Image (tube, rainbow, N blue to C red):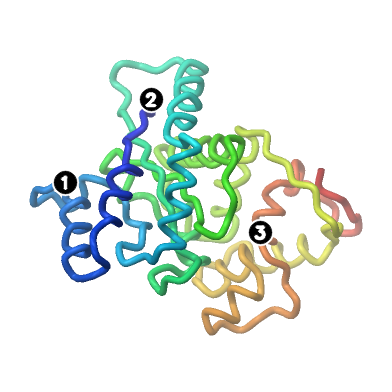
Amino acid sequence: MPFEVLPVLDAMLELYEKPRDQARFQAYLQLLGGGTKADLAVPVLHFNPMAKEPFVAKLRDLVQLKAEGIAAQTLRQLNLARSVGSDEPLYRVALNLADDLQGGWTNRYTTDYANKFNIGPLLKRGFCTPLFWAGEDYTPALVQQRVLAQAWRTRYRAQHPQPRTVAEHLAQERFVTEQISERIDLEQPVDDELWMRYQVVQHATDTPTLLTFFYGDAAAQQLGYQTWGNWPAEAGFRLAQIPDYQARPTSRKTRLK
């Protein structure tokens, strides 16, 4: 399936030039619908329409970096690397910026989860939304990595149903890791506790288990779920980055590279 960039950043900057009032919110809704009665014409769902200036400054950083140009070049290379049939659907890629600075619009954990796993409605409309955060710094490498990761999630989900269990969620992220050759270097080793916890919860489908397993006790505490006792942040994603996690013995410790 081919991908192309759907530019949205300049339109969002123009939106934020309006006073932070109900008129701006209505303009945001008009943008979502493309000025028509369409339910979703421009996928800018993760933007906070009432964001304050610190968020807008970070959006300017993305624009000055020419993030959409970097995304376009990344997607051209991805399209060329695969044989694309003429009957394959086109996916339009819109960079989204979520407000984790001074806005009450966005929860970091639930938003990230939705953008990675609850993407079926977007796929049906031909959209792909790489997600960035106002609280992080941007580089060309980060833009490339986020765009590639979300494109590969889109390809995976085009052929797989909505993940339900922990194991199904992990399989999706393991596929993404394999495609983009993403590896992380951890200060602390991932020991048997991570693997053994996965064996216990791999068939679970409830939201508290899913979010705690992937995002750690910090997410559980913030969302009012029972914590697991110093369960590390991003633990589930770390397991997905272990090349042989499914065959990993429970009596061996390893360090991710």
Dot 2 falls on a residue whose secondary structure is: loop
Dot 1 falls on a residue whose secondary structure is: loop
Question: Residue 130: x and y, percent?
Answer: 45, 45
Question: Residue 76: x and y, percent?
Answer: 45, 21
Q: Which residue is mark 1?
A: 34
Asked whether 122 or 88 is in front, the reply is: 122
Q: Which residue is mark 2?
A: 2
| Residue 20 can be seen, yes or no | yes
Asked whether 209 or 69 is in front, the reply is: 69
The quarter of the image holding the N terminus is: top left
- Which amino acid type corresponds to the residue marked 3 in the rendered image? Gly
Q: Residue at x 27, y 45 (%)?
A: 11
Dot 3 falls on a residue whose secondary structure is: helix
**Closer mark to the observer between disc 2 and disc 1:** 1
Question: Residue 247: x and y, percent?
Answer: 78, 46
Relative horizontal placement of residue 75, taking residue 87 as reference (left or right): right
Question: Residue 150: x and y, percent?
Answer: 48, 41
C-alpha span from label 3 to label 1: 37 Å
Mark 3 vs mark 2: which is more N-terminal?
A: 2
Relative horizontal placement of residue 130, taking residue 186 as reference (left or right): left
Q: Which residue is mark 3?
A: 236
C-alpha span from label 2 to label 1: 23 Å
- Which amino acid type corresponds to the residue marked 1 in the rendered image? Gly
Could you tell me if the residues under marks 3 and 1 are in contact, i.e. CB atoms within 8 Å?
A: no
